[in-house]
Image (cartoon, helix red, strand yellow):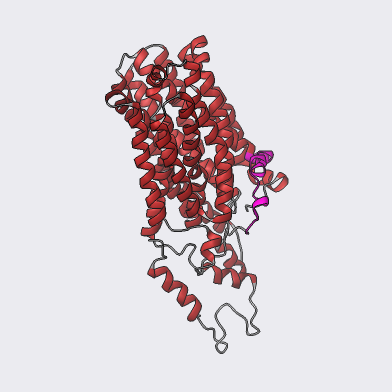
Amino acid sequence: MAEAPDVARRESEVANKSPRTSAVGNVPAGQRPDGTRSVAEASSANAELPYSPFSTRVKVTIVLITALTALVGPLSAYMYYPSIQVVRDEFHTTQSAVTWTITVFVIAMAIFPLIWSNLADKYGRKPIYVVSMLVYTCGSIGCALSRNLAALIVSRIIQAAGSSAVQSSGAGTISDIYPREQRGTAMGIYFLGPLLGPCLGPLIGGYVGQDVSWRWVFWILTIWGGIMTLLAVFVLPETHRRIVSKKYRIQQINIPPELSLKDNNPLVDILTIRYPTIALTFFLLSMVFGAFYTNTTGEALAYQNVYGLSQGTSGLCFLASGIGCVAGALIGGRVIDLLLKRSKRVMIENANQDSEEEKADLAKVKVPPEARLGVVWIGTTLFLIGIITCGWLIDKHLSLAGVLVMQFCIGAGMAFTAQGLTGYLIDAFPNRAARITGAQNFWRSVWGTAIVQLFPTILANIGWGWTYTVMFFLTLLSFVGIMLVALKGRELRAKYGPFDAP
């Protein structure tokens, strides 16, 4: 599995050994008699090479492994939530103290992706997947064997450190193997991991903690981590474009230069927020993720305290947002691909170029990253409708069925929005896909940690309806900012940066 497929290898061999010839003697096509190439000719020759040496089957396998690996972080967070009261009683501690087992996990998930993403750009994706999953598995074993609160807190930090790698490297892996016009569908599958975790975690963790033991929550996660480690070692190939390009002939696109460790500075990634378009994108991502995670935290309280459901039955209700996430991820990814193809076609049709050389260049026109933001309008609108309606349905103790429908809208809207915004960031930094994903993970996690911690206090003071209304208006405010990026983003990038994208 780690080898490139025969088809791609034959294509490379043909490109190397059997060049097409022109009418001028035996000069390869696209090359002048004096041995030189024009820019358009060199570009055409590059375009004839495969973007990635992997077959469709191998690429699908890579995406599935990446998505399954990305699931471990959210699962580790949310499978543990239903058992926190049991852990508090077993360790004879306070609610405030046991909450640190959640807080340190979230903080570690914000910080460590910045480190992993830089290491992945230096040493490749595969070694990072292997090492991080080994770290995660060891942390999960430590959680299961913990005999006091201090040991559990330390183990949760180790567990979060390991599970966080794919939160940044996963998007980099997708950009390694798919060109921009095909990336949306693959990103949709990848996002199933991070988005399904908050929905499946409480369901699985609730039943396991209730019927077996809270320690078995971590033993299950240990088994999952072990399986992901084996897949990373024996199935997952190296995908980093700089490393792959040394072994196979591929298009010389989005191949980052090799940097020394001192040049891989996480602070540089964090400070990408200085660019107006990136700051506004981070803003909406943070508000949407913060509202989504706050809603997920509130769901369990609403189902049990407002609608009187049992712990197990309330866990089943999380499937509504989970199904929404699946639908949004699969449909949204396909819509993004169609948007990019449509934008490219329109750009080609609107340009009135006459010379053959100009037409050759035009055929390889680069669609600006803002083309991906069309799906964000759909997703955020759906998300906003779900949030505001759900909050007031719970506040007035109205239809549980209506709440579940709105949870579906929240999940689908979240998936649409997250894909569009993450794709935009990757296109804005084509040579730093993993690092920019780590930066957006940092900023959204900072806000997510703050709002989730504040949620119980806000809820106690103003109730369900107004709490969700606050989240609605914060998200709406950030949505106004992304509309500016969609309309004027290209001009803002040309003036203020980043300057990596067309």
Task: Specify the quadrant that holds the N terminus.
Answer: bottom left
Against 249, residue 442 (above or below) is above
Name the residue nearer the viewer: 433 or 393. 433
Q: Say whether residue 479 is visible.
A: no
Give the residue at the far bottom of this rendering: 25
Residue 262 inside the magenta-drawn segment = yes
Quadrant of the image occupied by residue 201: top left
Q: Is residue 154 left or right of residue 261?
A: left
Report if residue 262 is visible in the image: yes
Measured along the vertical axis of the image, is residue 450 above or below residue 361?
above
Q: Residue furthest right?
A: 495
Tell me which residue sits at (54%, 51%) in the image: 120
Residue 66 in the image: state x and y as whole percent: 42, 48
Q: Residue furthest top?
A: 461
Residue that sits furthest to the front in the current view: 147
Q: Residue 96 or 436: which is nearer the viewer? A: 96
Q: Residue at x 52, y 26 (%)?
A: 103
Task: Residue 345: say if magenta.
Answer: no
Who is closer to the viewer here, 225 or 283? Answer: 225
The tally of labels here is 0
Q: Which stretch appears magenta?
A: 258-278
Identify the residue at image location x=55%, y=48%.
434
The x and y percentages for residue 462 are: 51, 11
Q: Position of residue 151 (x, y in %)?
A: 47, 29
> What type of secondary structure mainly makes up the magenta span?
helix
Residue 61: x %, y % from top left: 37, 54
Work out whether residue 43 or residue 58 is closer to the camera in this orientation and state it. Answer: 58
